[in-house]
Image (cartoon, grey):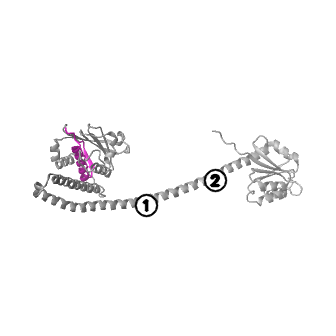
Amino acid sequence: MKTPIENPVKLLIVDDKKENLMSLQIILADRGYEFVEANSGKDALRILLKSQDFAIILMDVQMPLMDGFETAEMIRQSDKLKQVPIIFLTANMNTTDYIFKGYQAGAVDYMIKPLSPEILQAKVMVFTELYKKNRELKIKEEEATILNAKLLKANEELEAQYNAIEKYATELKKKNAELDAFTHISSHDLQEPLRKIQTFTNILLAKEYDNLSPDGRIKFDRILYATNRMRDLINDLLNFSQTNVTDRVFENIDLNIVIENVKEALRENIKEKKALIKTNIHGNVTIIPFLFIQLLENLMNNALKFSQKEIPLQIEITSRMVNGKDLDVLNLAPVENYCHIIFQDNGIGFEPEYSEKIFGVFQRLHSRDVYNGTGIGLAIVKKIVENHNGIITASAKPMEGAVFNIYLPQ
């Protein structure tokens, strides 16, 4: 990448004699200066009205019509030009009054003719270097002003975005609360007519079932199936809405106790499937007990439901304490300690591409005619894990079982 060519430093040289102008350019040659000539005071003022970017003015004092003193006084009246240094070049330095008049007119220095090339070169170099530094500083200040303006605008945009997000989050929180209340109330309201349907259905089942025609019995059985499914759906919706609880009380307890409670609750289902449940638990775990019992119930029900008919169901639950840096899992904090729980079964499994889909609400991978269910159980599981600030993943292969990995920060 090429460095941009720096603008040359401009010098205004003022003298009524051509040979003096030439002499100045020869002395200061080969130093990267750009010379602008003026052969009178008026000519110098005319040039300065068009351009003010001069590093220094070298001006003869004794010029006809308008001498150097008058010209300097006129220059100093301009706000844009009064900072440009003026060096007087003169052969007349006889009196103190003469010197004082020069400084009073605005000169920063005097040089006596005949000029010393070395001294002139040194003095001009001092002022031109000062000019360069001031020019660089000005550019930096302009860049800083532009950058500050951009930062100010960016901060205003960020503040507007933050306010919009905060407003959206408040609205979303309100909508979620309304939705949870609606789900809870609706589920309870739905249960009342459902109980009446089940009550009258049970009366018909006890007294009139044998009197029904074969076609009527089929329709009656469908009513029973539909009401039972409706009951399961309402219960699952209630459970799903209750996983949003804000009062989350964590306890440090033995996971074996939680598993035994779940096994007791599902004892008949486990017995019916002749399922074998193995555990290998290491240490206590910090959890919300009533939610975690529900989580394990749902996982175990899922395994019982999707077991293979020809092979006895086996469920294995293991746990270990491990640091995040030792786990190759996205979004886990490397400095955090985690309880890694593995829930594995030898059921029908599923295709690997469904490993995320199975956690969605009302997501089903199999026909309801083949496997009963509402499609909410694993969604509840994921929500409970998230309420523990954890992560859950699933992996499986068809007819080779499924594995659920749960990571809970401790």
The residue under the point 55% across, 56% down is: 153
On screen, residue 245 versus residue 92, left or right, reads left
**In the image, is residue 299 part of the stretch drawn in magenta?**
yes
Q: Residue furthest right?
A: 64
Q: Pinpoint residue 19: horizontal percent, then vertical percent.
A: 88, 45
Front-lying residue, 196 or 240: 196
**Residue 198 versus residue 378 in the image, above or below:** below
Q: Is residue 346 above or below residue 266?
A: above
Q: Nearer the viewer, mark 1 or mark 2?
A: 1
Crowding at dot 2, Cα within 10 Å, few <14 / some 14-19 / many 20+, comes out as few
Q: Quadrant of residue 274?
A: top left
Three-letter code, disc 1 = Lys
Q: Are marks 1 and 2 in contact (CB under 8 Å)?
A: no
Quadrant containing the N terminus is top right
What SS does tag 2 mark?
helix
Magenta highlight range: 281-309
Q: Nearer the viewer, residue 191 or 392?
A: 191
Name the residue carrying label 2: 142
Say what secondary structure mark 1 lies in: helix
Q: Which residue is mark 1?
A: 167
Note whether residue 409 is visible. Answer: no
Per the model, the C-alpha gap separating discs 1 and 2 is 37 Å
Specify few, some or many for label 1: CA neighbours under 10 Å numbering under 14, 14-19, or 20 or more. Answer: few
Q: Is residue 37 visible?
A: yes
**Picture coordinates of residue 298 (x, y %)?**
24, 48
Amino acid type assigned to the residue bearing label 2 in the image: Glu
Q: Residue at x 65, y 39 (%)?
A: 2
Sequence-earlier tag: 1 or 2:
2
Answer whether residue 395 is magenta in the image: no
